[in-house]
Image: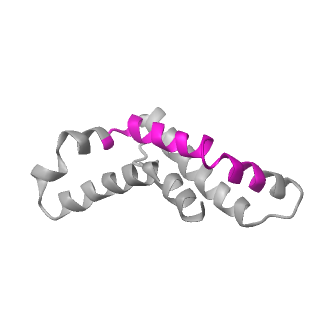
Amino acid sequence: WGLVGLCTTHHLGHHLHHMGLHSIAHTPIMNVLGNPWISATIGITALLGPGRKILVEGALALLRGSPNMNSLVGLGAVASFLISAASLTFPSLGWDAPFFEEPVMLLAFIL
């Protein structure tokens, strides 16, 4: 739940910025959480930590030809992380895809 709290705080920063509360949206903690490398670290921690069992079970079910809900969640979580990682690693692609929080939130809904 700690990872979810961090991601929720980061999303709150977007909402505060949108409401014009820039002094709150740009506090030191919000700036740290807004760093894409920090978001990537949180995302990979969620995937390899608490989400690992779900990802493995989903992949095995998919390979057996009998996908289940874990397969769907795993595909969504891994796809959003990989797109974000490609966007961050290769800025020349021109993708603005900061979706590192989505795997964390998706896994949190089912854990």
23 sits to left or right of 29? left
| Quarter-of-image position of residue 92 | top left
Name the residue furthest right.
Answer: 64
Q: Residue at x 39, y 48 (%)?
A: 96
Q: Is residue 69 magenta?
A: no
Question: Can residue 12 be spotted in the picture?
Answer: yes
Q: Residue at x 80, y 64 (%)?
A: 67
Q: Is residue 75 above or below residue 66?
A: above
The secondary structure that most of the magenta stretch takes on is helix
Residue nearest the viewer, comparing 6 with 72? 6
Span shown in magenta: 33-58
Question: Can residue 93 be spotted in the picture?
Answer: no
> How many dots with numbers?
0
Q: Is residue 33 above or below residue 61?
A: above
| Quarter-of-image position of residue 35 | top left
Quadrant of the frame with the C terminus = bottom right
Q: Residue at x 43, y 49 (%)?
A: 2
Image location (x, y in percent) of residue 3: 45, 48
Q: Is residue 43 magenta?
A: yes
Image location (x, y in percent) of residue 71: 73, 59
Image location (x, y in percent) of residue 86: 52, 39
2 sits to left or right of 44? left
Image location (x, y in percent) of residue 24: 14, 52
